[in-house]
Structure formats: structure tokens, C-alpha cells
Image (cartoon, rainbow, N blue to C red):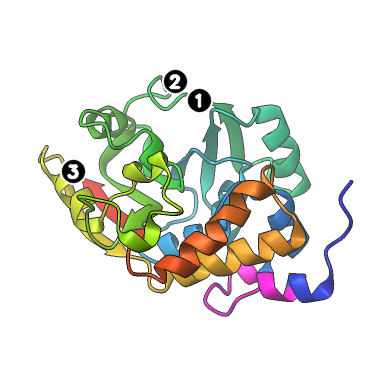
Amino acid sequence: MRAVIEQHIADRVRVDAFPRSAKYDPQWQLDNMMGPNALWLAESLSGLLRWEPGMRVLDLGCGRAMTSVFLAREFGLRVWAADLWVPPTENWERVREAGLADSVYPVHVEAHDMPFPHGFFDAIVSLDSYHYFGTDDLYLEYLLRFLRPGGQLGIVVPGLTEELSEVPEWLEPHFEPEFWSFHSPEWWRRHWSRWGTVDVHVADMLPDGWRHWLHWAEVCVEAQAGPRPDLTEREVPLLRADAGRTLGFARVVATKR
């Protein structure tokens, strides 16, 4: 069992930009992290969506269900916590510990083979995962089967300020092939709009997203948090070298026609 984090690390997890997330136990956030701070991404997206208590929401690629707990607790939603890699039994324990057994429902889901009824969800969100499967030209139309007409779709993913034709000089020492799955907000707008089945209301970069990403990575390195601390350690020099010129988080919000 890893030692309890020191107070100065706990203080760094709480940031003014995300007041709702700051209410959550820093130890819990670090223990369950799988990448950038998922609560911060969920909070940044939630301000762009219209929530009503009791809405059915699919949290696609939820990881360890932190975002599902956040959405249920903060907005009174019923959330299906769907993930491929984290067993639903593990997420169910986290959900029960959070006192949300009546609001969050963990399920094992592959993004291309989902078991839900068509038109079932009022909203679908995906935090730090949609770029792994949603860049496929056909995927949006598949996903929309499960969203009711007028339902909301929102994502936050690692993104680019503008599309790359080649790797910038300052990123060459740090660049990895998976970065080619990162796209600009305008790329996402075109990608979603071409079918004519959604109205895209927001396609932007999260303000100061790269700074928040770097801050979280530095905290995780200091706390030695996460399943692969070595990966987080590589993010720090990458984000420092880029300094927001290229990398950040893309946010996209749309409604189904």
C-alpha cells in the first residue's frame, strides 16, 4: 500500500480553476488516476452542457469511474460507467464507497459493440478516451444510435492548437506515434459536422489546458502516482518544451438532430 501523500501534494491537487473537483479527496484522485486529471476535464465540460437531475448519461471510457462519480454527485445524474480495461466489479466497489450505488452503474463495454437500447441516453460524454476510437469516419454515426434526438454529446481529449503536417522541432525529442491521434478543435468540428446528424455548438481548446496538464503531471511525478509513473515522467519535459504552442485539450459539444 502506497504511503499517504504529504500535505503539500494534497494542496497542489486542489486548484482554483476547478472548484467542484477541489472538494474531492486528493488521495482518491491520485490513487485512481490513469492520465490527466479526469475530474478537471469533466468539470470543464460540464459547464458547457445542460444538466437536469435524473438524466441518463453514458460515460464512455470512464477508466476508474471517477468522472461517473463526479457527474452523479454534482448534478444528480444517472450514469452508466462504461470501460473496456477496468473491470466493472472494481468500479462497483468505488461507486459503493462513494455512496452512489443507486446512481452509477459500471459496465464492461467495447466502444464498437455496445449493449444499450437505441435512443436510451440523454447525454454521452467521453473524457480523455474518445480519440482512441472516435477518429474513425464511421464511429459517430454508430454512437448516435444510443443517443435520443436532441441529446447532448460532449468530449474532452488531448488536442492540437492546429493540425500538424510535420512534427515541430521542439517536439521531436518527445514525439510518440500515438500523438497522431490528437487533432485540433476545427478538425473535430468538421469530423462531426460532415454527416449532418449533429449540431456542433462548441469546438475549442480548454483555456490554459496545457498548464493544467503540466501541473497535474508534475504532481503525479512527485507523488509517484498512477499505474505507469514512467509515462507521466515523460509528459513533463514534453509539455514544458511545447509551452502551449501545440498541445492542450480539445473540447467538443454537440446535440443530435
Q: In this orientation, which residue lies closer to the viewer: 54 or 105?
A: 105
State the mark number for residue 109.
Answer: 1
Residue 14 colored in magenta in the image: yes
**Amino acid under label 3?**
His
Q: Which residue is mark 3?
A: 191
User: What residue do we see at 47% from left, 64% from top?
Assistant: 239
Within-10-Å neighbours for mark 2: few <14, some 14–19, many 20+: few
Of label 3 and label 1, which has the lower sequence position?
1
User: What residue do we see at 31% from left, 32% from top?
Assistant: 143
Dot 3: element: helix
In the picture, measured across the screen, residue 180 lies left or right of residue 200, that is right
Which of the 4 image quarters holds residue 118? top left
User: What residue do we see at 14% from left, 45% from top?
Assistant: 193
Residue 176 vs 92, above or below: the answer is below
User: What residue do we see at 49% from left, 69% from top?
Assistant: 240
Q: Nearer the viewer, mark 2 or mark 1?
A: 1
Residue 7 vs 118, above or below: the answer is below
The reply to whether dot 2 and dot 1 touch (C-beta < 8 Å) is yes
Give the CA distance from mark 2 to mark 3.
25 Å
Q: Is residue 86 visible?
A: yes
Give the CA distance from mark 2 to mark 1.
8 Å
In the picture, measured across the screen, residue 152 lies left or right of residue 34, that is left
Position in image of residue 26 (x %, y %):
73, 64
The span picked out in magenta is 11-22
Of label 2 and label 1, which has the lower sequence position?
1
Q: Which residue is mark 2?
A: 115
In the picture, measured across the screen, residue 114 lies left or right of residue 93, that is left
